[in-house]
Amino acid sequence: MNFIKRAWQNVIFKKGRSLLLIIVMTVIMIFIMAGLLIRNAAVTTVNTTKQQVGATVSLTANREQAFSKMRKSTSTSTDKTTKPTLSMPSVSLASAKKIAKLQAVANYNVSVTTSVNASSIDAITTSSSSNSTMMGGGGPGSEATSSTSTGDLQVTGVLNMSTLTDFKNSTNKITKGRALNSSDVGTKNVVIESELAKQNSLSVGDTVKVKATTTGKTAYTLKVVGIYKASSTSSTSMGPQQSDPSNTIYTSYTLANQFKGQTGKVDSATYTLSDPTKKTSFLKSAKKLVNTKKFSLTADDSTYQALKQSMTKMASFANKIVWLVAIAGTIILALIIILMVRERRYEMGVLLSLGEGRAKIIGQLLVEMLMLLVVSLALAGIGGRFAGNALSKQVLSSVNSSQTTTSTSTTSQAGGPGGSGQAPSGQQGGKQTGGQMQQAGQTTANKAVKSSDLKLKISAVTLLQLGAFGFTIIAFAVLLASANILRLEPRKILIG
């Protein structure tokens, strides 16, 4: 008799046993399917979002070299009464554009920071006891913060506002009008903060007048093309008014250069890479285009690394689920088949006495299990996605919580003396500590993962992987149970 036909008849006639095996295998397959879905989704998330949260590289003045030069000039100077000044070289716009043409660059931005005095409008004025203490009149050095040398409006000149971190992360949001882009180069368009607009009854299309603090204090008429809402506070110490973020206005870098009385220069340039994995090769190529003694190239891929770390942990957890369930499933099915063989000893003894080979009897068991596996795979395909979604949310929450705690701990350790990234003279430094960058990167990565929601997709590849795991489990289980079949003696079975 054909052993495949016998397998089909056993599956059909032994409905209770077949149903029990289907339930057991379905549970095993659902957990394996959930693990495979989470692992594949984690890998896919890293690959699809690395362009969105990719690495950035900043081209700025080399602060270490600037400080070294200042200290050297101080030590050789005969005039001990003059305070040393830190001279930061400006980045050549031509060099910044050369680097922007490198293959790995997705987009770039340049920045020029300066200040102006409000002429036709009133800046936001803030005061506090700390401001009075640090900035109040009457103390030594109070004249150094007067508006004659520093304006009451902070100007940030850019090429494209959409690539700025505050706007990409929705810390700042455009509420009316539009953001500045490359088409605003050479214009006097400006984007102002909503509180500044409310205080001066300004709307999109209005004009404001400001006066430069340099270049003979020239007056400029600016056109408001956009209004943004700032949700963060500034820590600059350039005056009580400039400590309020509402006094920050955005212009094109060309207009900011006019305020500063310079051309062809920028304070810094930021490049967003198309692929974070190309960071090393990009830095190597970019360093050939600039004087590394005067300028530094600083890469920040903390967001990508945080995302990759989260997804790696999820993939690792999913792999553990797959293998633990696979091993446990093999053992469980092997025990069930062993019990099933004991129950069917007489049937197998008859078959052996009729000349049926042991290999065909083992093959019959394997075919029976494969028939039941097909049903289990269909049920696992339906239930595996729901189990995967529920499990992935718990795992993602646990991973994010664990990494946020680690980042906070790192930030606390880095927050000691000298760890704040604050530049001398109270000005905001150009560097972040490792803990701060990691925590900021982790926050952005968590948002990226949440927005993608780890879309668990059941594809043909996933079903093939599940089928391969199921077949392997059944094959091992049948082989473990076949020891009893190989030991069967038909004469003893029939006599007994």
Image (tube, helix red, strand yellow):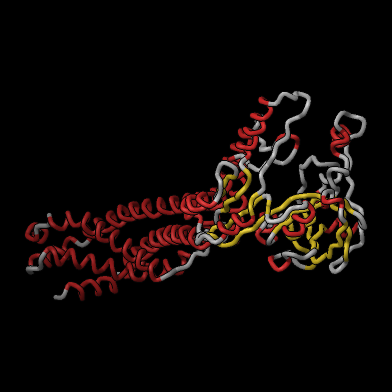
Q: Quadrant of residue 190?
A: bottom right
Please state the horizontal and vertical placement of residue 137, each as a whole percent of the image. 92, 34
Q: Nearer the viewer, residue 118 or 123?
A: 118
Res 208 visible:
yes
Image position of 360 (left or right of 36): left
Q: Nearer the viewer, residue 446 or 6?
A: 446
Please state the horizontal and vertical placement of residue 75, each as a whole percent of the image. 66, 25
Tell me if residue 394 comes above or below residue 418 in the rendering. Answer: below
Image position of 390 (left or right of 339): right
Please state the horizontal and vertical placement of residue 146, each as a whole percent of the image. 88, 40
Q: Split into 4 quadrants, where in the image is the C terminus? A: bottom left
Residue at the extreme front: 78
Please state the horizontal and vertical placement of residue 278, each as a whole percent of the image. 47, 55
Image position of 180 (left or right of 5): right
Q: Nearer the viewer, residue 120 or 95?
A: 95
Q: Quadrant of residue 411?
A: top right
Residue drawn where x is 89% and y is 29% of the image: 139
Residue drawn where x is 79% and y is 68% of the image: 177
Image position of 418 (left or right of 125): left
Q: Split into 4 quadrants, where in the image is the N terminus? A: bottom left
Res 449 visible:
no
Residue drawn where x is 20% and y is 73% of the image: 4
Residue drawn where x is 50% and y is 50% of the image: 288
Total numbered labels: 0
